[in-house]
Image: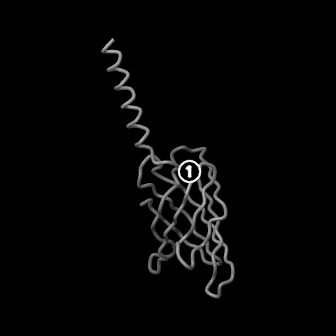
Amino acid sequence: MTRGLFAMALVWLTLAASASAQFGHPLDGLWSGQWGPRDKPNRLLLELDWDGKTITGVINPGPNAATVTSVKIDHSDPSSWVIRLEAEGKDASGRPMPIVVDGRLENIGAYRRVFRGTWTQGRDKGPFVVTRN
């Protein structure tokens, strides 16, 4: 009987340890990096939140933040998800400006995941890469 209780306790401890090691949704969290040409990069901070159903967030939180309006995920390849993120920002004069991010989420099983691809902001377009902090 004692061995059975010991084995059960060991199973519970193992399950508890594995449950606490999970990080939530792969896009959830703070991401930092840059987009644009290497000689004139634009700094990025993405704050993405998974509420159990949808992903919401902001790009470059602060007074000039862009609000994430849509996130589409193709996870047919479990090793590298295809992500399309759309947001509404503002140009220098304060007019609405669409932001479209097409990329791949890499290193999905690791805490410091990488999200890279093409960033389009208004008429400007360039490569981007962000890493989960």
Name the residue at the top extreme. 1
**Colouring used for the render:** one colour
Name the one closer to the observer, 91 or 56: 56
Name the one closer to the observer, 99 or 45: 45
Residue 98: give x, y in percent of width and height.
67, 73
Q: Is residue 109 above or below residue 114?
A: above
- Residue at image location 41% in from the left, 37% down from the top: 18
Residue 95: give x, y in percent of width and height.
68, 83
User: Horizontal placement of 63 versus 33: left or right?
Assistant: right
- Residue at image location 53% in from the left, 69% down from the top: 127
Please identify the quadrant where the N terminus is shown: top left
Residue 101: give x, y in percent of width and height.
60, 65
- For residue 99, which quarter of the picture? bottom right
Q: Which residue is mark 1?
A: 81
- Other-residue count near label 1 (Cα within 10 Å), few / some / many at <14 / 14–19 / ≥20: some
Name the one closer to the observer, 32 or 79: 32
